[in-house]
Image: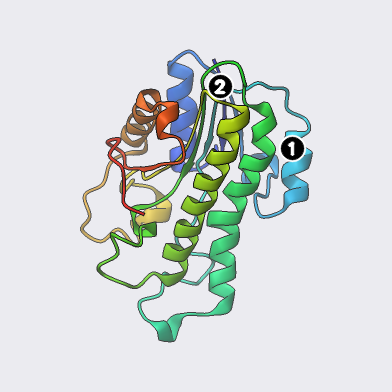
Amino acid sequence: MRALVIGASGGIGAALVAGLTLQGAEVLGLSRSIDGLDITDEASIATHFDQLSGPFDTVIVATGALALGDRAPEKSLRSLTGAALLGQFAVNAMGPALILKHAARLLPRDRPARFAALSARVGSIGDNALGGWYSYRAAKAALNQLIHTGAIELARSHPQAVVVSLHPGHVSTGLSAAFGGTLPSVSPDEATNHILGVLDQLTPAETGGFFDWAGKPIVW
C-alpha cells in the first residue's frame, strides 16, 4: 500500500506517517515547513503533485488551523472580520479541496482507495448549540460540502473509492492546547489509530460522509 499525508510535519500528520508506516505502507509526507507546499496556493500544489507518481491507495489531508496569526476564534459577532473569514476559508476549506482536485488522478480506479480530510465537529450546523467560532465553523462546514460534492463526482470514475471528512476528536497538539479548555483529549498517536481504524471500516456506500473518531456519522 502507498499513502500520501499532507501536513506531515504537524502533530497529527507526523503521527499518521508513523502509523501508516507501522501498517507496512510506503508513506510520502508533504508539508509547508519541510517541503514548501502551500495548500492555499494552487500553483504550489500543482508543482508538488506534478512530481508525484501514483497511485496512492490512501491520501489524508491533516492540515488545518484554529487560530491564524493573532486572530483567535471569535466569541461574538463584534470580533468577526472579513480577513478572518477569508483566511479560515483558504486554510480549512479551499486548501483541502484543491488537494482533492490534484490528488484525484493519483487515486487507483480499479481497487479500493481512501481520501480523508480532517474536519471538526464544530463544522456541523445541526450540532451547533453554543455559537461562536464563526470563521472556523463556517470554513469546516464549507470543507464538508466540498468533500461531499467531490465524493459524488469521484464515485463515477473511482467506484471503489471512499472520500470523507473526519473529525479526529480533541487532539493534544500545540495548535489546540490554547483553545481546548477542559475538553477530554487524546494524543496524536491515539487519534491516528482512530482515524486509520475508521478509514479501514468505511465502504464506498459511505463515501461523501462526515464521521467522528469512532466512525459514527455526524449531522451536517
| Colouring used for the render | rainbow
Residue at the spot x=40%, y=34% of the render? 206
Q: Residue at x 43, y 16 (%)?
A: 23
Name which residue lies at 44% across and 82% down. 79
Crowding around mark 2 (Cα neighbors within 10 Å: few <14, some 14 to 19, many 20+) is many
Bin the neighbour count of mark 1 within 10 Å (Cα to Cα): few under 14, some 14-19, many 20 and up.
some
| Amino acid type, mark 1 | His
- Residue behind mark 1: 48
Count of number-bearing discs: 2
In this rendering, is residue 102 above or below 42? above
Percent across and percent down for residue 71 are 49, 72
Assign a secondary structure to mark 1.
helix
* On screen, residue 122 above or below 171: below
- Residue 182 visible in the current orientation: yes
Kind of residue sitting beneath label 2: Asp
- x and y percent of residue 35 in the render? 68, 39
Specify whether 180 is left or right of 93: left
Question: In the image, what residue occupies the spot 38% across and 28% down?
Answer: 202
**Mark 2 or mark 1, which is nearer the start of the sequence?**
1
Disc number lying in front (1 or 2): 2
Which of the image's four quarters has the C terminus? bottom left
The residue indicated by pointer 2 is 57
- The answer to whether residue 7 is seen in the rendering is no
Nearer to the camera, 220 or 72:
220
Element carrying mark 2: loop
